[in-house]
């Protein structure tokens, strides 16, 4: 048994439709298609392969522990890129998304799923990647340099998607729980 999971933020349906139109425009105009194979999302934890039922149980228990957070507003604003290979919508850094990422990483760290030398977390929503050549990336950046985009949505949980070998599918939604309700470790004193 081997399953591939992705931990992410999924915007509301109306915003997904709007962002998908941008992805389709880029795909058609610049002949890049890889981003259309993934859901519209902000990655919170890179895709991870789990090889046993026990590992999956520990993974989802850790994610539930990471969900003791207050809802927050997330703003997507304008466009950015990782030089010459990825074009994206900026997901503005704020205390909410940074705490969410920190909590997920903290709870999953004991499972040893990721290498410790991962790149710094830059919240973003990918519009084109993987099949983007440097000259195409420069052309996309030039085409969007004067375009503005700003939308916000409330985050009250996060999602886990599962890959079936061809496509990502929604698997589980984990809603936030009040931080005041988080069980405290027992103490003798």
Image (cartoon, rainbow, N blue to C red):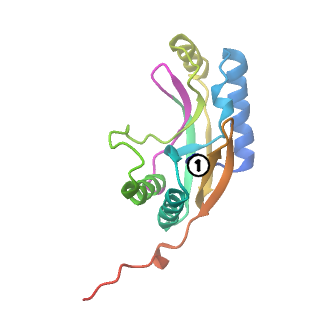
Provide residue 154's location: percent of width, then percent of height: 61, 57
Q: Residue at left 37%, top 39%?
A: 118
Asked where in the image residue 26 lies, by quadrant, the reply is top right
Question: What residue sits 52% from the left and 26% below the top?
Answer: 86
| Extent of the magenta region | 81-96
User: Residue at (69%, 38%) from the top-left corner?
Assistant: 167
Pick whichever, 172 or 44, lies toward us.
172
Q: Which residue in the structure is indicated by mark 1?
A: 1
Does the magenta-highlighted stretch encompass residue 21? Answer: no
In-front residue for pair 91/30: 30
Q: How many marks?
A: 1
Residue at the extreme bottom of the image, as rendered: 189
In this view, the residue farthest toward the front is 1
Q: Is residue 102 left or right of residue 37?
A: left
Q: Secondary structure at mark 1?
A: loop
Measuring from the top left, give residue 76's x and y in whole percent.
Answer: 57, 42
Up-down relation of residue 57 to residue 169 (above or below): below
Name the quadrant of the C terminus. bottom left
Residue 52 seen in this snapshot: yes
Q: Is residue 44 visible?
A: no
Nearer the observer, 181 or 107:
107
* Residue furthest top as drawn: 135
> Neighbour class for label 1 at 10 Å: few (<14), some, many (≥20)?
few
Residue 156 at x, y percent in the picture: 59, 62
Q: Is residue 40 left or right of residue 55?
A: right
Q: Position of residue 88 (x, y in %)?
A: 56, 31
Q: Is residue 93 magenta?
A: yes
């Amino acid at each position: 048994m081997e399953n591939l999971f992705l931990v992410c933020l999924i915007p509301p349906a109306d915003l997904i439709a709007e962002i998908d139109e941008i992805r389709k425009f880029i795909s058609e105009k610049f002949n890049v298609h890889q981003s259309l194979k993934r859901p519209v999302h902000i990655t919170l934890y890179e895709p991870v392969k789990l090889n046993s039922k026990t590992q999956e149980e520990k993974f989802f228990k850790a994610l539930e522990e990471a969900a003791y957070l207050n809802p927050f507003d997330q703003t997507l604003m304008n466009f950015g890129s990782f030089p010459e290979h990825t074009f994206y919508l900026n997901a503005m850094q704020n205390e909410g998304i940074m705490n969410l990422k920190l909590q997920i990483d903290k709870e999953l760290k004991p499972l040893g799923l990721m290498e410790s030398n991962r790149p710094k977390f830059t919240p973003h929503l990918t519009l084109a990647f993987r099949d983007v050549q440097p000259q195409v990336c420069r052309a996309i950046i030039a085409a969007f340099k004067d375009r503005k985009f700003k939308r916000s949505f409330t985050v009250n949980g996060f999602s886990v998607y599962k890959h079936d070998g061809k496509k990502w599918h929604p698997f589980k939604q984990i809603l936030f729980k009040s931080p005041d309700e988080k069980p405290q470790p027992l103490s003798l004193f």
